[in-house]
Amino acid sequence: MEHPNYLDKRDFTGEDKSSPSTMPMDVAYDSLAEIASKFSKLASTTHDPRYLQEYIKTGVLMAQSQASPHDFAVMIRACREMYRANCVFASYRHIRKISIFGSARIKQDEPAYHTTLEFARKCNEHGYMVITGGGPGIMQAANEGAGVERSFGLNITLPFEQHSNHVVANSERLINFYYFFVRKLNFVAECDAMVALPGGFGTMDEVFETLTLIQTGKATIYPLVLLDSPGKTFWLNWMAFIRVELLDSGLISEDDLHLIFVTKSPEEAINHIDQFYRIFHSYRFIDDKIVIRMNTNIPTPWLKMIENEFSDLIIEGGHMTLGGPLPEEEDEPHLAQLPRLIFPIKRGNYGRLRLLIDRINETPNRSYKPE
């Protein structure tokens, strides 16, 4: 597949870009503001110095607060882990990636292991890299299937069970994390799809957190695939629980289920992900509008059909229009050539937005010129 031309500043939330300076000034910081500003300008050789100034400001305010040494240790270690991960991923952000989750306890002779191997091989063949937890079981199968050159390992330091698998053990793309929350942030922020195989509490945590982030708009929508092995019922039973205990109880909506795709076929799984990026490229919220970037334009009749079908997502009085980049998108010149679908959106129902993306991707397979 053809890779999108992403830049390092990719924003996984899809929100408009805000000013680097967001923290209000504090009298405790006033006397140091000029020094911090000068230092930030001197040290910032590749970024807006206001970013470093905000970082220094946070540290100064903590140093003058009731924060404990442990609070400082958590902040410093978390930031260092985020910095290390950014350094590893920076050179690969132009390549789409798939995060693959599953149990560390799955053995090599079990069906789930072979299913993961087959799926990861298809990831490689279709041009994706894979991100795993870097450990044994499903994680090892995914790294083996994709190959070391197409793999990332996000390992977690544990006193038992977890250790780096032989595929990524000596790779420059192996990152060791102390904190689960920093590790999970990178799983979500750096991938373009997520595929989960059978697993325990950790896999459940990762699936539910990903669903929560997408459902609440804290992460952009991307394919979430639950992959089982032929003859197995792990995810079918999981979905039965979701439908009976969550959906039927009114704890989630029917539209939320559109965020999930369940299959027992590695071929169906990779095709589902490919289809998601067939025409759709990415989106960004700007004020009350959503700007959906597409790999190719869609014809006016198809646009009208989509507008009628998804009128519930459009703010009253608004319309869907095709066009080019908005002025607010000047900070993403690498996407300027992509056509846009733009409309004022009612935020909140991301399951419906996922259906809209699916409908865009169902546009008849032919080339169209912008109207």
Image (spheres, rainbow, N blue to C red):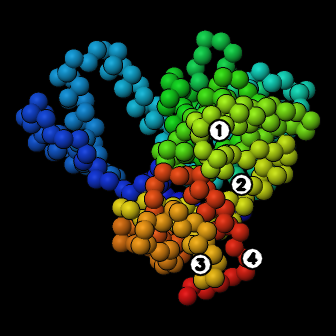
Report how far apart the C-alphas of labels 3 and 2 lie in the structure. 26 Å
CA distance for labels 3 and 1: 32 Å
**Label 4: which secondary element:** loop
Label 4 and label 3: CA atoms lie apart by 17 Å
Point out the tag, 2 or 4, that comes first from the N-terminus.
Answer: 2
Ranked by sequence position, the earlier of labels 4 and 3 is 3
Residue 57 at x, y = what percent? Answer: 21, 36
Q: Secondary structure at mark 3?
A: helix
Q: Residue at x 71, y 54 (%)?
A: 273
Category of crowding for the residue at label 4, using alpha-carbon neighbours closer than 10 angstroms: few (below 14), some (14–19), many (at least 20) = few
Residue 273: mark in rendering = 2
Mark 3, other Cα within 10 Å: few <14 / some 14–19 / many ≥20: some
Say few, some or many: other residues with alpha carbon within 10 Å of mark 1 (under 14 / 14 to 19 / 20 or more): some
Q: CA distance from mark 1 to mark 2?
A: 25 Å
For image coordinates 77% across by 52% down, the residue present is 270
Q: Return the disc, 4 or 1, that comes first in the chain's sequence.
A: 1
Farthest residue in the front direction?
249
Residue sitting at 48 percent across and 66 percent down? Answer: 314
Q: CA distance from mark 2 to mark 4?
A: 17 Å
Q: Is residue 338 visible?
A: no
* Residue 235, percent from left and from top: 78, 35
Question: Which quarter of the picture shows residue 252?
Answer: top right
Identify residue for label 3: 304
Instruction: Decide which of tag 1 and tag 2 comes sooner along the chain.
Output: 1
Foreground tag (3 vs 2): 3
300 vs 330, left or right, is: right
Q: Are marks 4 and 3 in contact (CB under 8 Å)?
A: no
Return the mark for residue 247.
1
Q: Does residue 353 appear anywhere in the picture?
A: yes
